Structures are given as structure tokens and as C-alpha cells.
Image (cartoon, rainbow, N blue to C red):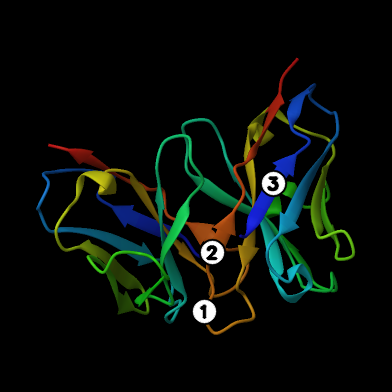
């Protein structure tokens, strides 16, 4: 059974930092791109960042470039998102998901349950 | 960046109805479009990928069509479980972007 379990969310002050983790099981983690998607309270979905199977290629949405860092540890089947210089507008539920980018399919086919990040003083 | 625009934003329908949701891209994305269903408090669920391919386990009443810049998601006969919010997403290039969502409500 495929499982993605996020952790690390919480309440942080503006300008603070947080590191999210996503523990993966049930598939060959090192064979897939992985992604972070966020959803502000009551709002729609926003893609945040992607990382290639071996970590050699990384993409970010403009609003987080220079502040967020996506990474992965294939030996630990884990995905991470280090978030620095957090702003109120970063408040959201953060999901990790599997991206079938390099397959002939595409789309995010497995998702975690999300971890909530709240940026407030 | 490619903008994705869904219409309508809200749709009221009854069980058994045929409904269509439209997604327009600001430039051509080929067939690189996915549709997701999201229920309150739950993660999104992939329904359709590559414009018209049905994800494994998704009922056949869901279908996708279109190409280039205009796409549709059709539910042939609404079931009670289908009332949710639906999002389109392109993956033609980075940054990926989602539509703003279509909330499907019970009439």
C-alpha cells in the first residue's frame, strides 16, 4: 500500500523557519519525481516545488524561490521542504505527492494527508 | 506562466445529471492536463491524466476531452459521491498551475 505521511507543520512567526518532511512507503521512491503542493485555508491548490528522482533537477514557483528548498533522501524514502523567511501568505496545508513527470502519464497520483503551516505573530 | 481558468466556479446539479466543467489554458499545453477531485478535509484525488486517460480505479462515468487550450471534464450521470470540488492542472512545463476550482453542489 502506497503511503505518504507529512510532518513538521506548526505555528511559526513571520520571518521564521520550518522544515517539512514526507515519509514515503509502498513504491520505489527513487524512481519518481516528487512534489509539494499547498492549499491556503478555503482556497485552491498551488504547486510549490518539484524534485527529480536523483535530486539533480529542482523547480519552484516564483513566490517561494530563494526562501524554500526542496530536497530528498532516497536512502530514507523521504522528501523535505525547508521553508525560510516565512510570510503570512505561506499559511497553508502542505501536501507531498508523487509526480509521474517522466512517465508517459503525468499527474500527481498519490498524495499525503497534508501538514498545516500557520505563519502568524 | 500558463494560466488555467475553470468555468463555472460553482455548479448546482442533481443526482443523475450529466455535467461538464471547462478548463481553458492561456496558451497551448498539448495534452498535458490532469483533473482532480477534492472533498472537504481530504487530499485531492487524480481522476484524469493526459487530457482523457482515466486513472486506475476511477469510475467510467468520468471522462476528459479537449486539446491545446480548451478541455472538459464530464460526469455522465452524477452520483451522490461526486459532489466535491474539481481542479484542472497543466503539466506542460514549469511552473505547473491549477485552475481555481469548480465546486459541484447538490441542487
User: Can you give x and y, in whole percent of width and height, for residue A17 in the image?
Assistant: 86, 33
Residue at the limit of the structure toward the top, as seen here: A121
Gap in Å between the C-alphas at discs 1 and 3? 24 Å
**Callouts 2 and 1 close, C-beta under 8 Å:** yes
> B52 or A75, which lies in front?
A75
Residue at the limit of the structure toward the front, as seen here: A1
Say which residue appears at 38% left-offset and 48% top-offset: B101
Mark drawn on residue A105: 1
Query: In this rendering, would A118 be left or right of A46?
Result: right
Q: Is disc 2 in the same subunit as disc 1?
A: yes
Mark drawn on residue A45: none
Relative to residue A15, is residue B52 depicted above or below?
Answer: below
Chain holding disc 3: A
Gap in Å between the C-alphas at discs 2 and 1? 10 Å
Element at label 1 = loop
Mark drawn on residue A109: 2
Say which residue appears at 65% left-offset and 54% top-offset: A3
Residue bearing the label numbered 3: A5
Relative to residue B22, is residue A42 depicted above or below?
Answer: above
Bin the neighbour count of mark 3 within 10 Å (Cα to Cα): few under 14, some 14-19, many 20 and up.
some
Chain holding disc 2: A
> A86 or A4, which lies in front?
A4
Q: Is disc 3 in the same subunit as disc 2?
A: yes
Of circles 1 and 3, which is in front? 3
User: Can you give x and y, in whole percent of width and height, for residue A47 in the image?
Assistant: 60, 54
Element at label 2 = strand
Amino acid at each position: 500500500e502506497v503511503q505518504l505521511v507529512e510532518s513538521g507543520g506548526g505555528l511559526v512567526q513571520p520571518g521564521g523557519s520550518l522544515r517539512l518532511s514526507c515519509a514515503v512507503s509502498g513504491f520505489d521512491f527513487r524512481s519518481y519525481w516528487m512534489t509539494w503542493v499547498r492549499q491556503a485555508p478555503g482556497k485552491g491548490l498551488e504547486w510549490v516545488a518539484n524534485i527529480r528522482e536523483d535530486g539533480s533537477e529542482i523547480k519552484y514557483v516564483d513566490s517561494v524561490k530563494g526562501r524554500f528548498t526542496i530536497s530528498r533522501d532516497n536512502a530514507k524514502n523521504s522528501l523535505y521542504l525547508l521553508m525560510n523567511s516565512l510570510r503570512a501568505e505561506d499559511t497553508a496545508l502542505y501536501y507531498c505527492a508523487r509526480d509521474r513527470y517522466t512517465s508517459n502519464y503525468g499527474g500527481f497520483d498519490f498524495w499525503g494527508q497534508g501538514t498545516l503551516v500557520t505563519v502568524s505573530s | 506562466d500558463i494560466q488555467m481558468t475553470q468555468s463555472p466556479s460553482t455548479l448546482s446539479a442533481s443526482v443523475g445529471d450529466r455535467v461538464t466543467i471547462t478548463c481553458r489554458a492561456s496558451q497551448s499545453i498539448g495534452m498535458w492536463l490532469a483533473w482532480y477531485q477534492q472533498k472537504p478535509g481530504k487530499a485531492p484525488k487524480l481522476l484524469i491524466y493526459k487530457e482523457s486517460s482515466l486513472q486506475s480505479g476511477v469510475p467510467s462515468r468520468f471522462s476528459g476531452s479537449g486539446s491545446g487550450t480548451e478541455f472538459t471534464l464530464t460526469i455522465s450521470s452524477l452520483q451522490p459521491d461526486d459532489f466535491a470540488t474539481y481542479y484542472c492542472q497543466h503539466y506542460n512545463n514549469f511552473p505547473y498551475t491549477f485552475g481555481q476550482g469548480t465546486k459541484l453542489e447538490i441542487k
